[in-house]
Amino acid sequence: MLKQFYIDTFSNLTRLFKIGIFAALLSTFEVYGYDGPLFDAMAQLDEKPGFEKAISRVRDAGIYKIALFARSKEYLGENEKALLNLHRDNKDLIVLGAPKYFLHKNDIGKSFTKRTLKNIDKYKYSFVGEILFTHADKCNTTSRQHESGEIYRDPSGKGFADFLVKVSSKNIPVMTHWEFYAWERDWPKFSKLFLDFPNQKFIIPHMGFGSPKQAKLVLSTHDNVYMTISKKNKKKRNICDPTKQSKLGSAFLNDEKQLKNEWKEILIEYQDKLLFATDAHKKHRWKKYSKIVRIYRDILNQLPEEVAKKIAYLNAERIYDIKN
């Protein structure tokens, strides 16, 4: 009896020990997820988060390249020089893009076109930073509100077409911010735009906050269109207009933080056209930069290894023409 007691006790302790090791390994796996290289394919910077502090966060998060552009909210070229100075000291890390300009009117102006084209050549920009076409008003204290409830610029505007005619010769991608909440209005116009400029690469941030069906239609219809997967880990909840909010697509993750099957299928099917990105921009998002990176490492870890590598960094290297 006593001998059997010791045998049973030892057996139970051994089993618990093994479970403990497995649990520890699993915990590490869940925390760190995909542990390969990461190329943050889209981030924005102005003076508020602090240039040096922001880039320190990027290095601390284990990012090996970041596609970064300045935010010009008050005048054309604002913060451009500061970002160029930051790049000078971090050439191993930063891939530069032309600045984002917030003060476009209904179309792209000639001054933006002239300055951007000149500086693409002067500073060897690898892409054109985000141009806002559709952007629903967000309900927070730092976002501007508009009478129409959105920023809207017609993608078929003559100024933008003139810009694309000229920039297409540079062979660099243009980021076009288009949120899919007004699909019936916008899809025909954007689809025509992508068809009219087949040799120009376009990047749509956040997969347009769209549904799997919408993302699939865009990606399958246009070979020259790519998407970042930023901000898709959870459903966008802070849209002021409830109608616009209801038109946005689902999040990547379920309540157990597992990748939903419908999104996993999209990520695998279009693995050559998707880019990991954080879209760090305002101060609050830069502060949680490492947390965002960890979330996306876990998402990538739920994909086949070769798919994860493409989305994590290989696609960005190819699209931004980075030679290592």
Image (spheres, rainbow, N blue to C red):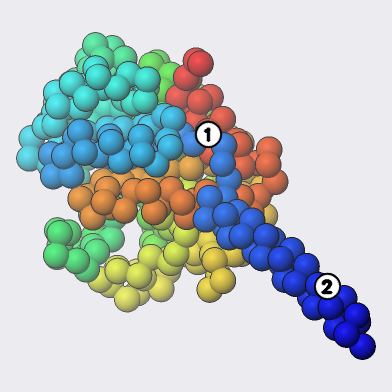
Q: Is residue 66 visible?
A: yes
**Which mark, by number, is residue 37?**
1
Secondary structure under the numbered disc 2 in the rendered image: helix
Q: Which residue is mark 2?
A: 11
Residue found at the very far top of the displayed protein: 122
Q: Quadrant of residue 63?
A: top left
Secondary structure under the numbered disc 1 in the rendered image: loop
How many marks overall? 2
Q: Is residue 166 visible?
A: no
Question: Taking 28 as reference, is 322 above or below it?
Answer: above
**Which mark, by number, is residue 258?**
none
Residue 250: percent from the left, percent from the top?
Answer: 50, 66
Marks 2 and 1 close (CB-CB < 8 Å) = no
Residue at image point 50% right, 40% down: 275
Which numbered disc, 2 or 1, marks the residue that appears first in the sequence?
Answer: 2
Residue 26: percent from the left, percent from the top?
Answer: 63, 59
Question: Which residue type does callout 2 highlight?
Answer: Ser
Residue found at the very far front of the displayed protein: 2
Question: Taking 133 as reference, is 185 above or below it?
Answer: below
Residue at image point 90% right, 80% down: 3
Crowding around mark 1 (Cα neighbors within 10 Å: few <14, some 14 to 19, many 20+) is: some
Q: Going by the image, does 153 lie left or right of 299?
A: left
Crowding around mark 2 (Cα neighbors within 10 Å: few <14, some 14 to 19, many 20+) is: few
Q: Which quadrant would the N terminus be assigned to in this image?
A: bottom right
Q: Quadrant of residue 56?
A: top left
Residue 83: percent from the left, percent from the top?
Answer: 20, 27
Q: Quadrant of residue 69?
A: top left
Question: Which residue type does callout 1 highlight?
Answer: Pro
Pick the front one: 16 or 7? 7
Q: CA distance from mark 2 to mark 1?
A: 42 Å
Question: Taking 204 as reference, is 110 above or below it?
Answer: above
Pick the front one: 25 or 16? 16
